[in-house]
Image: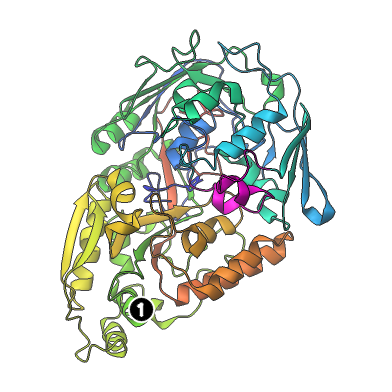
Amino acid sequence: MHTRITRIGLMLILVAALVASGCGSSKKSSSSGGKKGGEVTILEAAGGVDSLDPGYWYYQTDYSDLGQTVQRQLYGWPPDATQPVPDLATAKPTLANGGKTITIKIKPGIKYAPPHQTRVVKSADFKYALERCFLPSVGNGYAGVYYSGITGVKAFQAGKAKEISGITTPDDSTLVIKTDQPQGVLTTGNALALPCTSPVPKEIAAQYDAKKTSTYGEHQAYTGPYMIAGTEKTGAVTKTGYSPGKLLALVRNPSWDKSTDFRPANFDKITFKGGNDVTVASRQILNGQGLMSGDYAAPPTAILKSALASKKDQLNIAPSQGIRFISLNTKVKPLDNINVRKAITAATDREALRVTRGGPTLGPIANHLIPPEMPGFEEAGGLQGPGYDFLANPKGDLNLAKSYMKKAGYKSGLYSGPPILVISDNQDPASKTGQAFAEQIKQLGFKLNFRQVQHADVISKFCGTPKAGVAICPTLGWGKDFFDSQSMLDPILNGKNIVPVGNTNEPQANDPTLNAAMDKAETLVDPTARAKAWAAIDKQATGQAFYIPWLWDNQINFASKNVNGVKNKFNSSWDLTASSLK
C-alpha cells in the first residue's frame, strides 16, 4: 500500500513510513507470543489518516490505521501473505470468458457495526463501493488505474450511465465483474483487496456522496473488528473518537464475528495520537509501555543507533518493497530535455542522500524503479541495475553530468537559465534530504527557488498539482499497492493517470510507446509474463530519467518492550490486528 507522504500507495511514498536495508531484527512477524485484550497507543507525527472514507484511502497511514482495522475487503492480507486471501469473499475469483468474467461469492451473515447491526453485507454493497470510487466527491486515487478496464466504466464516468454495467449482482451473495480485456490485477484478486472493495450500503452513503466532497467517512458502516469510538448510537463520528491530526480511538465492533475473519484482533482498544515530536515520541516508545510507532519513518539517527545496540528486539527492520526517488517534471523547462534530466541524475550523490536518512541501515542504493522482493526486480537489473552510465556512480559523477548538459545545448556544461522551483518536505529527516540534493545540483549551475513546506502540503498543494509548476520534488517515494509491479509503475508513469489534483505521475511522463507497453502489460494474466513485461517498462522508463531512484528502503517499525509487534508484509507497517501485548 502506498506509503507516500505522499502515497502506499497502499499506497506514494513521500513516505510517512520508512526505511532501511537488509538487516533484520529478532522481532517476530507472526502473531504468536501475545495475549488477548489490553490497550495500545500509536504515536504519530505527521497527523495520521488523511480521510475517514474507505473510498479515499490510498495512503500508508490510512490503510494501516483504518483499512485493516475498521473495514474488511473482498480479499485481504494476513501478516506473512504475498498473495491476497479471501476475506469477505468465500474463495478466490472464478474466471470465465478468457478471464474477462470474474465471479466472486460473498460470505453470508456478515453484519455491520451498530447502529446498523441488523443490516447484512450484500453483493450490492460491493457494487456501490466500486462505483462510488469513481465519483469526484470521493476523490479516489487508484480506481482509474486498476478498475478502468471494467465494462461500462467510461460511460459511468462520463455521466452517460447511472451505474457501471460491467458490475452486476445476480443475487445477494454473488458479485460478477466483466472487463473489456483480461485484467491481471483483477483476476488474481490483488486489486480486489484494495479499500474500494470495503462494502458500502448505498442507502447510507448516497446522501453523503451527493455532496461536493463526500462525508460518508464520518458516518460509515463498519465491518472490521474495530470501529471508531462513540459511533455506536448514531453512526456519526464525534470528537471523542476522532480529532483530525490529534486523535483516533478505535474500540471493538460487537457485530464482528471472529470465525469469519483471519484477523485475531487482540487489542481491546487502539488509540492513535498525532502531532508528536519524532525524537520525543521515539524515546517514549522505546522506553515506555504499550506504545508503537506510527506514521513516521524510523527513529532519528542517534536514537536508531542506540536502539540497534541495546534494544534491537524492539525493532523490526525489513525491506518495504518501496522506493525513494526524486521527480523531474518534464513539463517544466529545462527538464523537458532528456539530457538535462540525465545530467541532474548523474550529478546526484545518492549515498549522501542516504546518509541524511541514517546510512546503510536504511536500505540499498536504488538504480531503477522496481524494488527488491517485487516481481520483475531481477529482470529489470536487480541490485546491479540496467547499466545506464548516469546511474553508474552512487556518489555522483559531475564530469559526466556536465557532458550531458553540453548535449542539452549548454556549452559550458552548466545551466544558465532562470531559477527553477524545488519543493521539499520540511519535516526531518526529509528536510535534510531536500537540502542535500539542492546543494548537489547547484554544482551544475542551477539557480533554485527552493522551498520547504509542511509535510501535508508537499503533494496536496505542490508536487501532486501539475498547475503548481514544480520542477523537482526531491522527497518523494512510492510503495506497492500489492505484490505486482504494475502497482509500482503504472500510477507514476502512465500518461493516462495524470490528473489535476492528487497526481501521482509527478514528472507528467506521457510517452506514447511507454503508455502502450503499460496498457498491454495490464492485460497479461500469467505472473511470469507480467513480471517480464513490467521489468522491460522499468528499464525503458529509467532510461528516460523521469525519476532519480536513490533508495530501496526498508521499513523500521518499533514498539515498547511489552508489545508483541507483528509486521504485515503487504504494507510493511505494524499489523495492528495481529499485534498484541506480551
Residue 388 coordinates in the image, percent (x, y): 45, 80
Seen in the picture, residue 221 relative to 349 is either above or below; the reply is above
Say above or below: 217 vs 439.
Answer: above
Above or below: residue 269 compared with residue 50: above
In the picture, measured across the screen, residue 474 lies left or right of residue 562, that is: left
Asked whether, in this view, residue 536 is left or right of residue 151, the answer is left
Q: Is residue 184 visible?
A: yes
Q: Secondary structure at mark 1?
A: helix
Using the rendered view, name the quadrant where residue 408 is placed.
Answer: bottom left
Q: Which residue is mark 1?
A: 342
In the image, residue 540 lies at what x, y percent? 52, 75
Give the class, few, some or many, for how many residues have Cα within 10 Å of label 1's Cα (few <14, many ≥20).
many
* Magenta highlight on residue 126: no
> In this view of the protein, which residue sits in the foreground, 368 or 186?
186
Magenta stretch: residue 142 in it?
A: yes
Quarter of the image for residue 553 reads bottom left
Residue 25, given in percent of the width and then of the height, sits at 47, 44
What residue is at 29 percent from the left and 29 percent from the top? 284
Q: Which residues are magenta?
A: 141-164
Q: Disc 1 marks which amino acid?
A: Lys
**Residue 488 location, x and y as percent?**
52, 58
Task: Give above or below for 156 relative to 552.
Answer: above
Looking at this view, is 433 or 363 the one in front? 433
